[in-house]
Image (tube, grey):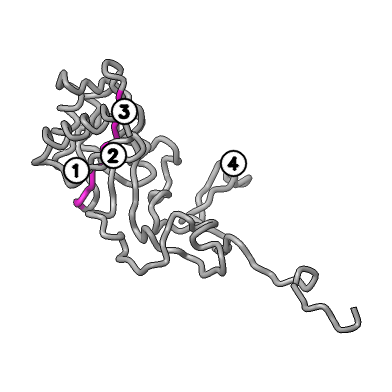
Amino acid sequence: MSEHMEKFHSQLEEFFRDRLISSTLYREQITLEVDAADAIHVLTDLKDNPEFQFEELIDLCGIDYLSYGKADWETQSTTNSGFSRGVSQDVYDDQLNKPARFAVVYHLLSISHNRRIRIRAYIHNEPPRIDSVVDLWSSADWFEREAFDLFGILFEGHPDLRRILTDYGFIGHPFRKDFPLEGNVEVRYDPDKKRVVYQPVSITNRVLVPKVIRHDNRFEKTEPSETE
């Protein structure tokens, strides 16, 4: 790990010490965790302070930590190495000790200083609300609409907060962990009405396991017989 990044990490911790939940430096990536109420102040300082100058918002996305860290399948060998390799077999609370269920993550780039940083803001409101950063970075416009559409996160002060990926009549937010896998409604073209209509889903939810382990005698190790 470079001395330059460690020095910059310490500088950030000192500057934002009253607003940070935590901060980490891992593989040259700095992550600052804050409450949603402090996010706009931290982000404004990161953009406008000459010592930081994060002029560009690279990405913004939502996160749902519901049941985070729990494996959904009991398997012989894949829980920690296959489909569920990102989780642990230990018993955790529903949110794995996370400060809140929902969070917004911002990835920033400083062209002036050639640095990148990640900010994770935890949202405690219900419904989840956080200040918009469109006034700081205009690129946040569609990013925030996407997070609203998929996670139901409300960005206060956004000039045009409406769905961007799902249909106008869509129900719910499909990236929430408790959203039904088969959805709430389905659409089809009605030849009699000559238009697309909504109706209750006609499919049945079927959860698949990531790996099915079958025993095959062709690959079983056996002891050689006495006649061999």
Tell me the tag on residue 194.
4
The segment highlighted magenta reads 115-125
Query: In the image, what residue occupies the spot 80% across and 70% down?
Result: 218
Q: Which residue in the structure is indicated by mark 2?
A: 25
Q: Tag 2, which secondary structure?
A: strand
| Side (left or right) of 20 relative to 164 | left
Residue positioned most to the bottom: 226
Q: Which residue in the structure is indicated by mark 1?
A: 34
Q: How far apart in space, not on screen, are marks 1 and 4 (Cα)?
A: 51 Å
Mark 3 vs 4: CB contact within 8 A: no
- Give the mark, 4 or 2, whose residue is nearer the N terminus: 2
Does 20 appear above or below 41?
below
Residue positioned most to the top: 112
Mark 3 vs 1: CB contact within 8 A: no
| Side (left or right) of 175 relative to 52 | right
Please check the rendered image and state whether residue 121 is part of the magenta-colored stretch, yes or no. Answer: yes
- Give the mark, 3 or 1, whose residue is nearer the N terminus: 1
Mark 1 vs 4: CB contact within 8 A: no
Asked if residue 200 shows in the view, the reply is no
Asked if residue 79 shows in the view, the reply is yes
